[in-house]
Amino acid sequence: MLDEMSVIRRILNGERDAYRTLVERYQQPIYRFVFSLAHDRHWAEDLTQEIFLTAFEKLNRFDSTKGGFSTWLFTIAHHQTVNGLKRPRLRFEKQAIVDRCSQNGEPVNELLRHEWMTALDKALERLPLNQRIAFVLAEIEQLSHQQIADIGRTRIGTVKSRVSRAKAALRKTLDKWSGMQP
Amino acid sequence: MKEDSLYHQWTEDHRRTTPPDDLVDKVMAQIKDSPQAPDVRIQAAWWRVAQHPLTHAALICLATLAGMIRTATVLAAIVDLK
């Protein structure tokens, strides 16, 4: 297993190339998090780069006694994404949240499945930002409620409530789907 | 239940979102080429100095001295008023 602290010490001692190890490890969750909130690949890519650059520049402020590196990195990602979403964007291409893989099922069922997956994406998109963030971190990234509270600098009870409200909203979408099943 | 299975598939689809292949190289190029990027070694050295017990002791001494000067000033003002 990668010893992140020893990598961080190497970077702080001037071995900049060692940072690649951390970028390789966290590029997917950070990109996924940003993209889930913005639905714009170019923007998500640019912002992910900015997040890693900021983390590099602030690496000496990382305090392992206060939490893990991933929590610290997600805190930066959370902050920059929320700020980024407030800024007007010159280029905004709204895209499907995920590229759906084709499944080997009945074409009619497959079409219905795809339709409802898209409906779930839209339901996620309609959630208030704080609920969406809590939901993505809890259900997609599978972080603990405590980690999410640390990332958002809020209380664990608030996180639980946000995740629960987000799930209830998505459940409504699923219930409609269930009612339309053949 | 069908809904649970659909929900599971949906979250799995989200987890399959992947960044562009060259993302790591782009980040590393920015880190290497950026002339504005602060030298983390200097920052780390400052951080170590700030956390050193002697620095804390020196700050406490300065604060005490400042407190003493302030007290002396106030006392002088009181004496002067009398």
Image: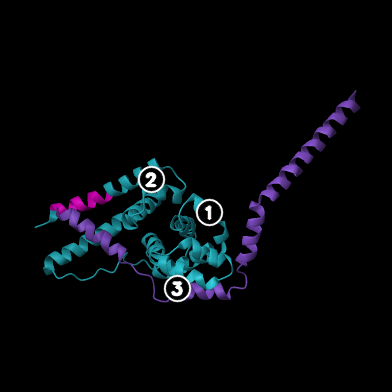
Chain colours: A cyan, B purple
Q: Nearer the viewer, residue B27 or A96?
A: B27
Please rate how many residues cluster around mark 3, counting C-alpha atoms within 10 Å: few if below 14, some from 14 to 19, many from 20: many
Please rate how many residues cluster around mark 1, counting C-alpha atoms within 10 Å: few if below 14, some from 14 to 19, many from 20: few
From this viewpoint, is residue A177 visible? no
Q: Nearer the viewer, residue A24 or A153?
A: A24
Circle nearer the viewer, 2 or 3: 3
State the CA–CA distance, disc 1 to disc 2: 23 Å
Q: Quadrant of the N terminus of chain A?
A: bottom left
- Asked if the stretch drawn in magenta spans residue A83, the answer is no
Quadrant in which residue A122 is drawn: bottom left
**What is the three-letter code of the residue carrying label 3?**
Val
Q: Which mark is residue A146?
A: none
Which chain does the residue under circle 3 lie in? Answer: B
**What is the three-letter code of the residue carrying label 1?**
Asp
What segment carries the magenta color? A169-179
Quadrant in which residue B77 is drawn: top right
Please rate how many residues cluster around mark 2, counting C-alpha atoms within 10 Å: few if below 14, some from 14 to 19, many from 20: many
Say how many tags the image has.
Answer: 3
Q: Which mark is residue B24?
A: 3
Quadrant in which residue A30 is drawn: bottom left
From this viewpoint, is residue A4 visible? yes
Q: Which mark is residue A159?
A: 2
Query: In terms of secondary structure, where does tag 2 sit?
Result: helix
Q: Which residue is mark 1?
A: A63
Residue A63, compared with residue A109, is above or below; it is above
Q: Position of residue A149 (x, y in %)?
A: 42, 47
Which chain does the residue under circle 1 lie in? Answer: A
By secondary structure, the bulk of the magenta-drawn segment is best described as helix
